[in-house]
Amino acid sequence: MDSPGKQSSAHSALKALTSAALVLPGLLETSGLAAETDSVSVQYSRYQEGERDLFNVKNSMDPLQVDTFRLNGDIGLTDRLRFGFNFIEDVWSGATPVATAPLAAGSNRPIREGDTVVGASPMLNRPVLLDSDLNPLQRDSITGEVLGVESRSVHVLATASPEARRQGDFNLEYEWDNAALAINGGLSVERDYESAFGGLSGRWDFNQKLTTLKGGVSYTDSDITAVLDSDAAPYITQVDFQDQISFKSGSEILREERSDFAANLGLTQVVSKYSLIDVNLGFTHSSGYLENPYKAVSVIFVDPDQASNAILSGDVRALLENRPGERNQGTVGVKWVQHIKPLDAALHFDYQFSRDDWGISAHTFEADWVQPLGGGWTIAPRIRYYSQNDADFYRPFLFSFQRFSEIARDDRGREIWVDDQGQEFFRDENFDLVDADGNVVDENAVNARPKIQSFDRDQLPDHFSSDHRLSGFGTLSGGITVSKAFTPGVTLEAGFEYYSHAGSLKLGGGGEDAFADFNYFVANAALTVDLESLDFSMPEDHHTQHHHHHHASHLVPAGLMYAHMMPSATPFMVGYRFNYSRRDGPKKLLHGSNTASDRTVVADGCRDIGCRFAPTYMDRYMHMVEIMYAPTDWLNLMLMPQFMSMEMNLRELEGRPPPVPEVHEHTGIVGHTTGGVGDTIMASLIRLFDLPGHHMHLGLGISAPTGSVDLEFRRTAQQDGGLVHFGMQLGSGTWDFLPSLTYTGHQERWSWGAQVRGTVRLQDENESGYRLGNVFQSTVWGGYGMTDWLQLSVRGVYTAQGKIVGDFNAFNGRSGPMDFPSNQGGHFVDVGFGVNALIPKGWPLAGNVLRFEWLQPVQDDVNGFQLKREGALTASWNYAF
């Protein structure tokens, strides 16, 4: 048996090795069991793909990118009970492969450098020539000469409207001396996919805590409501999916369900006081709709009457992919962690093998080196290799010897169209839509779609997919993370990893052809606060001298910016601020202070072109990280980066002008989203006077235009998507001056204050041709301390915001009042109700400040036509040390 001294030393080494892993990129994820220290972290990451190889076809679509904001924490509620939480927000945009097709189908002549493609690219639903062995042939469109076999394939790219996903989850763990049990759950919500999940996990320490047995189970229930509105949607033949698809305001909605059950079992063994090994087994069972509703498969239909021809003509069509309804996957993983004592470093080596009943086997090798450099710096390089073979049903494209007819026709040869209730309509000789009696009908009113004529499904495989993620490929990546501990308990890290994805990198060779190759990178930055490492004690002389900074009765409301200064005895503060605001008006818009009818909006809201749509609601989410430093007792410096996201739905206005023929309208009926990094604020607060019970300071700030103002709707073959509405861009696009003047006072449990602040645009216009209006805001508030640590507050706010100056200098759809500069800004009055808490000594999170405020609109007097404001919620956390 090991001696107590050896046990303690080995267990300490285990904790040190485990904590060393936390500086690695992507390891800020919470496990089934909570961490051992109280901590809060915020993280931003960017996933960015490179251009796809379309063989010299100029692609006008931006590659896929994902911006992610994450907030997580782990808090000890008691000596035995811990609580962990995560909040994640992702925003996806850009072009992705929707199918694969023969390169020869893209054109009747060779694709030449300089060719430009917009919308779904480079082809869907095209004819293609084949030789008797079904090899695609290329020919010249002018001479008709067959140029030979073109064996290359190419991805068909498509864009969809940007998507936002929000996920919140929790973990509650109870610990005994040698064991722990945790329950976790959460919800992930996006426009087309909603998942609820929960699970149990536990661990048991034995062998003097040198050995740990761990395991867990989880269950996820998901609802799919896929909006088939990508560029490729008009080309996809939905014969086999008509029972799954419904229609809403002109958009196809595919509704399905899926469920996932997962179980894992693991063993961690301390081998020596400098090394440990961790072995894990996992099993996942998935059932239901396992397809990606935005992925299609190209099928080349060949008329069987051509079978004897030397050259065949194929009809390329796109079908939604069809995967099996179940998937079982097993994994085994081994991790070795070695502490290198002479260098005070740690080496991590991981291997994982997985296999499923779809035929995919995958290997992952990863090595990381964690090297402290002194002075609080740590560097962690890493290398990773992944390889998988293809799924049994993966095919780049398919062949079918049968005729294909897309639109059904009646005995007179007219196309048959059906509405949501199955009523039939017909296209007459003038191409008008008519009913059974020959009466012309309003196409917008009946919302009819072509009736798809089925083909022989039995001539296709039971399952098929051309999703490149199911193909055989390998990825090789290298990355590095650099972290700096500025004070005990506060760490800033930045990481970057670059990946190469290629069929030739598959283990043993034989992967997918080069058309599926691409590169991508992941960059992230994180701020982590270890609350247990911070000094929560407050010296008596400091408490006496700066009492108003450490008494809840004297906290300012959560919605106020630039209203709090720190004394020099606490030179640093870190914090997080969340703001949610909503505008709503499902039936009416405001015009000034009054509601306006749809016909008034149509006539006057869009200058002389006539409004066609109006917003029904707009939600705005803001996450802000606050870092404050006080170099002296009269000066505070602030840095505040932001992450933004917005959502908006539109509706058709009554009496709107008719649609323009052959022009696609971005209706936004099912919603559209934008999101990403917003503007970055840098400010200084200058103390003017600080007397007993009275304080005043001046704020001088600058807003840097780091938020995009050139975001565009997706492009289609019919129309350039154009710039997104003014209010859904991510920033101002200009350098802005942010002055403020704040007064605060207090007497026993009472506190009060006033502030005036403004936003002055320092440039005439941004890169999109306009500048937002200047802003003036004044506010007064009062608060009463219910206890030494809990305060209630109320405040009044007046805001004046000017109209937008200038206009878009690029195409914008001009579909409604939200696209016109005169319909921005106004005068607003609000009342705020707040709750502020300074966690007292002896409690978990002692010394932390939590604040919440709801801002209720009292009066709106808007410029032009706008949605009515429904209110705003602000929640903030900060700690000064």
Image (tube, rainbow, N blue to C red):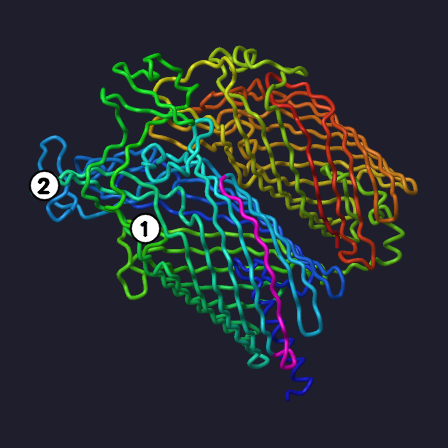
In this orientation, does residue 503 appear? Answer: yes
Quadrant location of the C terminus in the rendered image: bottom right
Location of mark 1 (residue): 463
x and y percent of residue 730 in the render? 55, 35
x and y percent of residue 94 in the render? 42, 40
Residue at 49% x, 71% y is 335
x and y percent of residue 762 in the render? 59, 28
The reply to whether dot 1 and dot 2 touch (C-beta < 8 Å) is no
Examine the rendered structure and indicate whether residue 173 appears above or below residue 739. below
Q: Please give the count of numbered marks on the rendered protein.
A: 2
Give the amino acid type for the residue marked by disc 1 in the picture.
Answer: His
Magenta stretch encompasses residue 196: yes
Residue at 45% x, 44% y is 65
Depth order, front residue of 304/806: 304
Q: Quadrant of residue 483?
A: bottom right
Q: Secondary structure at mark 2?
A: strand
Secondary structure character of the magenta stretch overall: strand
Residue at 28% x, 16% y is 428
* 1 vs 2, front mark: 1
Left or right of 251 in this view: 202: right
Left or right of 87 in this view: 689: right
Q: State the extent of the magenta-drawn residues as a range.
A: 192-210
